[in-house]
Image: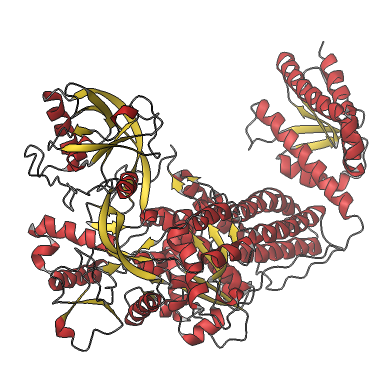
Amino acid sequence: MAELPKTYDPKSVEPKWYARWIDHRDFKADPNSSKPAFSIVIPPPNITGVLTLGHVLNNTIQDILARRARMLGFEVLWLPGTDHAGIGTQTAVEKYLRRTEKKTRHDLGREEFLRRVLEWQDKHGGIIIEQLKRLGCSCDWSRQRYTLDDDYVRAVQKVFVDLYRKGLIYRGRRMINWDPAAQTALSDEEVTSKPQKGNLYYVRYEIAEEPGRFLEVATTRPETIMADTAVAFHPNDKRYVDLVGKHAWRPLAREKLPIIADETIDPEFGTGVLKVTPAHDKLDFEIGARHKLPIVDVLHPDGRINCPAVPELNGLDRLDARKKAADLLAARELLAKTEPYENNVGFSERSEVPIEPRMSEQWFLRYPKAKEALAVVRDHLIRFFPAHWEKVYAQWLENIQDWCISRQVWWGHRIPAWYPKSQIPNPKSQTVENIYVDLEPPPDKENWVQDLDTLDTWFSSWLWAYETMDAETRKKFYPTSVLVTAPDIIFFWVARMIIAGLEFKPGKSDRAEDNIPFRDVYFTGLIRDKLGRKMSKSLGNSPDPLELIGKYGADGLRFGLMRIAPSGQDIRFDEKQIEEGRNFATKLWNAARFRQMHGPSASEPKIDNQLLSIYAVEVLARLNETIDAIEAAYREYRFNEVAQRLYEFFWSDYCDWFVEAAKTEIFGADESRKKSALAVMDFVLSAFLRLLHPFMPHITEELWSLLGLGKDSIQFATPPEKVALEDTDLAKKRELVSAICEAVQAGRNLRAEGKIPSNKKTRFVLRTPGETIGPELPTIVRLLNAEDVNLMPNYKAQPGIPVAMTPLGELYLVIAGADKGAERDRLDKEIAKVENELRTVESKLENKSFVDRAPAAVVEEHRQRQKDFSEQLAKLRNAREGLN
């Protein structure tokens, strides 16, 4: 058996094992396997993306689930792939072109631009896949898919055609969200509301029929005044009711506007008077439609002002024009005042610029199966973890709006629709009656022009759960078992995949349970920095995961991150926690080396209940409890709880207590006791490595191999079962271990308070009437690092000798030149502490409601605690009195 090196080096271990897993095709899914199926589809990262901590969190969780399922005997498919990221990729390439060639995509033309995007994709695409492999992800890489694969593109276009023929997809002119940076339409879900500090401008509109009389209008956007087509107030607002039917002069691009009344106006906002700008506000558009107002658009697609009638503003960026418009109004004495104002502004989720409401001819989808999608979650055919996301999901579906699915980008799935060249020169500028929609162009295609737009990237992603699988794979692995994703795409992706599954029925029957895309959905939290801020490149607070892997190893990063990732809650990231993950790997390595120093391990260690020390009994009982707790946590997707239980069990229960106690037997003369202690070590190490493997796959595989705990890869080793502890005195033995641990901890505290170095031997006296403690004295001496511990039932300590009340009796730290004053202060603190504990217990027992309603065992436990605290307090007071 190869000897473990003195130090653990993840740089040599992790690449070695990952290459071996790939070579052995350990991650490959077999659709013909007789094993039960477990499947996950990866949330596809952008093709040109790089690994972030969010990816690390999401994919580590998926890997934990996949690896655990393999160990449980499932045939596992973790299907990887990437997304073409229409807007994101096109924007990146356009920025590169502007920087390097001072050109736009329009300068190159569609065909050449798409060729440049493909070059960019070939250069930058797939980097994130290699980074996921560095993390240890056990995806079936032979099935890697891409949203622009030929088959996938065909499937997306087929869905478009089918929905169009069902009347669910239509083309219409509506108010949409416009991204001036990407110059494309966005769906409502792609708009993020952010509070913005700005100004409220009070603008004076003169009454045309009453010169010298003005209406004051409060607005945050004076740059759109040129698009005003009316002035409005609430019909019940008595201040202005006499003005209905009259007109006001528009201050910029002077024109006479009707004064109208509309019930949607809020009398409490500003002055209660609204400038109605139908082309640039959704509420104003609705008012304009009711009152048959004209629509005047004064913005270019890129957000610059388009109003030659006001040359001072024409061509300015909308935000620059805002200040300039205010200056113009002030110069003309039409700006009454300006006040600081904070309001919520919609931002493009992609380009992070304020969106513009805009009238535009676009393609829309009327969502099918919305009620059914609501029902499958409400009835728990699909379960959400944490469950509170069900309410958010339901609110969206109950208020669902038609989905704007067309995008004015060139990179993506082109819409399979054609317009006759002879009918109109620009099919996007007006309604077209004659539209040809099919997978192939019309027979006389030279007389038709294809729609220039592509589909929203999410329109391809909603098919991801099943269109990534061929028929054979789908039969075995669809519906998938679980989806791991972030809650910010619950509408973008999760809900839409559910709708797609129910509408297109890719399952083996028409039943909803066979067509839902997944059984469970686990929503991760958001990783923030120590100050609670979102991580971003601009803030410089987003560490590079590859650098962290370089410093701490992939296993260290995975385990450190999972320990601080509470279910569904945001995570405060601190690199020290990743360092703790690396330190845990070192602890595990050193514990394994200690075991190897004492001979070869047994792959199937035999536990002899008759030879077990009380410490072995305790660690095996704690292992059983850990197995139960981990199983319960997995059922609820509480990964941080699994990680924390593993950490606490191994570091504390196994290393700090059992291994230290077992050294008495290992270095003792009784060979049978030594073998028993080593067998327990083998049993616990074997079980623990299997429990830990999904979290830290590389080091567990290395130790499993080097210790000889199994012939095959740990990936397919069966999870540990609880050991049967056949012992009638189990409870008594565990109680004794607990008492010894408490006494040892008390002794260590005495040493610390006496400033005695932990490596310096010292003497203790234990005043105890008990005789059962005698056989355990050598272990107590070792755990206390004591010169000796004398059992003296009648010991009379000199005044000032430090003492601690323990379940074993009074424990004295025998030191020369005892400081009475220091011991008096210490005892006073200890007495105050016990008095407080006693008061709490007595308060509960004096509460009749508690005594009557609490289980009898709980009440009895409190009475026993009252008795123990009372006895402890009496001894402490007696010791304190002896110092007077």
Q: Is residue 214 left or right of residue 816?
A: left
Whether residue 127 is situated above or below residue 421 in the rendered picture: above
Whether residue 508 is situated above or below residue 208 in the rendered picture: below
Query: Which residue is at a point 61% across and 51% down the rendered structure image?
Result: 644
Query: Which residue is at a point 32% across and 61% down the rendered structure image?
Result: 49
Judge by depth and name the residue closer to the eye, 728 or 333.
Answer: 333
Single out the residue that lies furthest toward the top. Answer: 884
Please say which color scheme the image uses. Answer: secondary structure
Judge by depth and name the residue closer to the eye, 408 or 299.
Answer: 299
Query: Which residue is at a point 29% across and 72% down the rendered structure image?
Result: 413
Query: Which residue is at a point 45% across and 68% down the rendered structure image?
Result: 42
Q: Position of residue 738 (x, y in %)?
A: 80, 44
On the question of residue 792 being in view, the answer is no
Judge by depth and name the residue closer to the eye, 510 or 470.
Answer: 510
Q: Position of residue 150 (x, y in %)?
A: 32, 81
Position of the C terminus by quadrant: top right
Judge by depth and name the residue closer to the eye, 270 or 249.
Answer: 249
Q: Is residue 137 left or right of residue 598?
A: left
Position of the N terminus by quadrant: bottom right
Q: Position of residue 613 (x, y in %)?
A: 81, 56
Whether residue 591 is situated above or below residue 510 in the rendered picture: above
Q: Is residue 413 left or right of residue 552?
A: left
Q: Position of residue 136 (x, y in %)?
A: 46, 66
On the question of residue 635 being in view, the answer is yes
| Count of marks placed on residues | 0
